[in-house]
Image: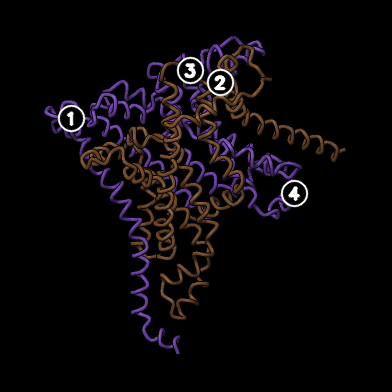
Amino acid sequence: MRKLHQNKRPENFKKKDRRSLYLLTMPSFLVLIALTAVPLIFSFGIALFEYNITKPQDAAFAGLGNFVRAVEDEYFRSAIKVTVIQVVSTVTGQMVLGMLIALLLSREFRGVKLMRSLYIIPMMITPVVSGIMWRMMFNADLGIINYLLGKLGVPAINWLGSPKTALVTIIATDIWLSTPFVTMILLAGIQGISQDYYDAAVVDGVNTLQKFFYVTLPLVRPMVLLALLFRIMDAIRRYDSIMAMTAGGPGVSTQTLNIYAYYQGFSYFNIGYSSALSMILLICILAISLLLLKMIRNAQQD
Amino acid sequence: MYKIKMKIINGCLNILTGMIVLASLFPLYWLISTSMKSKAEAFAMPPKWLFTPDFSNYSGLLGNPSFLESLKNSLVISASATIFAVVLGVMAGYALARNNSRSGNAMGIGIILARMIPPMGIIIPFYMIFNYLSLTDRYVSVILIYLTTVLPFVTWLMMGFFQGVPAEIEEAALIDGCNRIGTFLRICLPVVKPGIATCAMFAFMMSWNEYFYAVIMTGNATKTAPIYIQSFVSSSGTNWGALCAASVLVVLPILVFTIFCQRSLVRGLMGGAVKG
C-alpha cells in the first residue's frame, strides 16, 4: 500500500528529496563562505590600499599600486626565487623518494608490516617540533649531524648559519617530514594493482625497469597526481618548520613568499602590501591546483 | 643460479628497507634521548650514547602550570574543532555525494577550493574582524579559524566515503517511505563509521599540530602547546632537555593513537581521497 502511495507522487517526492540534500549541505557551505570567502574578499580590498596599521591616517587607495610595488621589490623577487627552489626541490625529492620507498615497502617479507607502520610516524610529528628537533641536530658545533659527518672526515658545516646551506637544510627537513605521506598514498595505490597485470607482463618477457614504467607507473598515476596536489599546496604555504629553524634567515636566504607576506603584515604592519602578496600567493596556488585537479579527473577517466 | 641471485637481491633490498626506516626514525630517537639527558649531557661532545635516563625534565614540565595550561588549551580547541568539523562535514559530505545536480557539484568544488586558500590570505581580515568584536584570545576565534582548514578536509574525505556506499541500499528504503534524512541517519551513517573515525583523527591531528593561526590568534589565555614549545627557544637561552621533553609530550598523544589505529587510518584516507 505504502509503496503505491509513494509512487503516485514522485515529482513532489523528488523535490522534497533535493531540498533535504541542500539542507544537509548548507551549514557546512555557509560556515565556509563566512569564514573564507568573506575574509578573502576583504583581503582583496585591503590589497588595493596603501595601508599601514600603525599609521591609519595615511591610508590611501592605491589601486594596483601594491602589485606594481611587488614587481619592483627585490625582496619579493628573492622570495619568489626561494619559494620556487623550495617547492620544486622538496616536492621532487619527496615524490622520487616516496615512490622508491613505496616500491620497497610494497614487497612482502618478514617484518614488512611493522616497517610500514613505523615509517609513517614522521608524518604525525608536529611541524614545529620537527623544526626544533632538526635545528638541534644541525647545530654547527654541538649537533649530531656534524659529529657523524666528522667521523667520516667531513669538516664541520655551519648548516643553518650560512645562506647557501640553510635552504638545503630547510628542504631536507621537509623531505624527512612529508615523504611518508607520499609513500603512504603511493603504497596504497601499488597494493591495489591486480597481480594479473604483472603476470601478463612476465609472459611478455619484460624486465623489472620496464615493469615499473609500463605497468606500475601508469596504474598509480591518479595517486601520483593526488600526492603531488597535496604536497605542492602544503609546500607553498609552509610556515611552521621554517619559522622554527631559521625564521627566514640568514638574511633572506630562506624567506619564502609566504613568510615574506607574514613579515610585511605582522612585523612591518604594511597590511595593504602584505595582502597583495597573499593574493599573488593565492593565485599561484589556485592555478596549480586547478590544473592538477583537472589532470586527476582525466587520469581517473582513463 | 637465477633463484639464488634473486634471493640475494631480495635480501639486500630487505636490509635496505630496514635501514631507511631506522634512519627516518633516528631523529625521534634523538629527541627522546635528549629529553632524558641532563643539561651537561645533552650537548656533550662526543655525544653520550649511553646515559642514565633522567626524568627531571618531565617532572619539571608536569609540575609547570603554564605548560599544562597550554596542553589543556590545545585539547579544548582541537576537540571542539574536530566535533564541529565532523558533524558539519559528515552531513555535507553525504549530501554532496548524493546530489549530482549542477549546483551540488558547484558547492562541492567551492568547498574543495576553501582548502586551497593560503592562511596568509584570510588571516589579516579575520584578525581585524575578531579584534573589532573583541573576540581575540578566546577559544571561539581559534576554533572558527581552524575550521577553515579542517572542515573542507573532512567534507571532502567524507564525500569519498559516501560515494563508496552503493546508492541501491538507500533506494530501497527511500521507496519504502523513509525520507532522505532518515536514510542518511539510519542506513548510511552506520556503514561509514570507520570513515568518520578516520576523519575525526585527522581533524584532531591537524588542529593539534596547527601553528600559523595559533601564532596570530592566540594570546595568554588560549596559548596552544606548539606555541608554548616555541616560546622555550627564545626565553633566556634554550634549555634543550626541557624543550625536547615538552616536544615529546606534545607529539606523544597523536603518536600513540595513530600507531594503534593506523590500518584503518590509511585505508580510510585512501578510500576517501581517491574517490573524491
How packed mark 1 is, by other alpha carbons closer than 10 Å (few <14, some 14-19, many 20 or more), is many
Q: In this view, which residue lies farthest toward the bottom?
A: A1
User: Which residue type carries mark 2?
Assistant: Met
The tag earlier along the polypeptide, 4 or 1, is 1
Q: In this view, which residue lies farthest toward the front?
A: B63
In depth, the one of B83 and A192 nearer the eye is B83
- Residue B45, above or below A64: above
User: Which residue type carries mark 1?
Assistant: Glu
The tag earlier along the polypeptide, 1 or 2, is 1
The tag earlier along the polypeptide, 3 or 1, is 1
Residue B166 at x, y percent in the picture? 53, 67
Pointer 2 residue: A137
User: Which residue type carries mark 3?
Assistant: Leu
Pointer 1 residue: A50
Q: Which chain is purple?
A: A
Pointer 3 residue: A160
Pointer 4 residue: A202
Query: What's the chain of the residue with tag 1?
Result: A
